[in-house]
Image (spheres, rainbow, N blue to C red):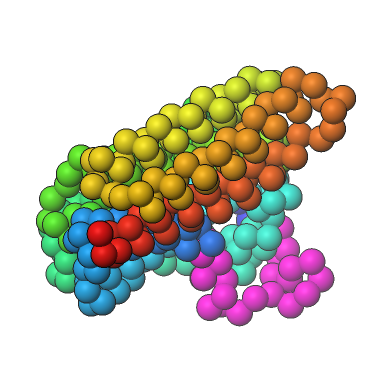
Amino acid sequence: MTAGPLHPQATVSGRPARSKLRAYVALTKPRIIELLLITTVPTMIVAADGWPGWWLTLVTLVGGAFAAGSANAFNMYLDRDIDRLMNRTKQRPLVTGELTPRQAVVFATALGAVSIGWFALLVNAVSAWLTLAAILLYVVLYTIILKRRTSQNIVWGGAAGCMPVLIGWSAVTGSLDWAALVLFLIIFFWTPPHYWPLSMKFKKDYARAGVPMLPVVADDVRVARQILLYAAAMIACTLVLAPVASLGWVYVAAAVVAATWFLSACVLLYRRALHPERGKLAAMKVFHVSITYLTIVFVAVAVDPLLPY
């Protein structure tokens, strides 16, 4: 199968194509970058036991955005053949023909090189090496090796999405610590309950593209059970973080309340999977709740060290 454009005249749904600039921005998946950066600043605050400074925060966020944009652009280049088969992704710029594969590769390579050099020159060597590892994890481990071969693709490939906390921690301290590892594990265990509900919603898309996401190869009950197990592990890690990172009662209270809310959404999904006659799965509710949940937890991570107790 060739990977040429679906729309030779580079139009999108009958409308004029995006500008080149907007197409390049779309190549970076900015909404995913936003979610990744939400976890970086709170991690830096915990690592610094207070505000780490505007300059260090800014350069870390910019470098992180470049790195994530590079990985996402490589992902779109490598997945352009299956993106054209899925309704959710068929308007991506390499499918519509707004950008060529060569332009995408050059852009992704340039962003990646800039991000690694950025961290090496403006932050420290540890952060630069972790940035390189993050890009390779997403592009090589997830996109090339795992995505089309195993239903556990998002579990192990999702480790790339955990790297911003390690990069943020090392940007402040020049090293890693147990608290950084626990933060890593929170996002690691959060990724399946976040992504599998989305895959349940679009499993026909994934099946059409030949991508063996868990909801494609397993029934809804098994998927919902796995979501519950990963959510429980994630919640356990959020509670372990309090003593490891010396966080106080504000963080603990926010983590417990958010966990109760998120877990109830996961339990509802499981019950609906067991008893489909009770109504629709409402998988996307779990997806959206997962985003709010992670935001609440990491806002609490950021606020707690700044409080006067």
* Residue 228 drawn above or below residue 185: above
Q: Position of residue 302 (x, y in %)?
A: 34, 60
Please say whether residue 167 is one of the residues in the magenta stretch. Answer: no
Quadrant containing the N terminus in the rendered view: top right
- Magenta span covers which residues? 6-30
Please say whether residue 23 is one of the residues in the magenta stretch. Answer: yes
Q: Position of residue 74 (x, y in %)?
A: 44, 54
Residue at left offset 80%, top offset 21%:
275
Residue at left offset 30%, top offset 56%:
43
- 306 relative to 1 in the view: left or right: left
Nearest the eye: 39 or 232: 232
The reply to whether residue 109 is in sight is: no
- 50 relative to 174 in the view: left or right: right
Quadrant hosting residue 98: bottom right
Quadrant containing the C terminus in the rendered view: bottom left
* Residue 138 drawn above or below residue 308: above
Residue at left offset 43%, top offset 29%:
233
- Name the outermost residue toward the front: 309
- 228 relative to 57 in the view: left or right: right
Main structural element of the magenta stretch: helix, strand or loop?
loop
Residue at left offset 47%, top offset 63%:
34
Q: Position of residue 105 (x, y in %)?
A: 43, 60
Q: Position of residue 162 (x, y in %)?
A: 36, 46
- Name the outermost residue toward the right: 277
* Residue 291 drawn above or below residue 194: below
The reply to whether residue 201 is in sight is: yes
Quadrant hosting residue 261: top right
Nearest the eye: 60 or 189: 189
Quadrant hosting residue 188: top left
Nearest the eye: 83 or 245: 245
Total numbered badges shown on the rendered structure:
0
Nearest the eye: 9 or 255: 255
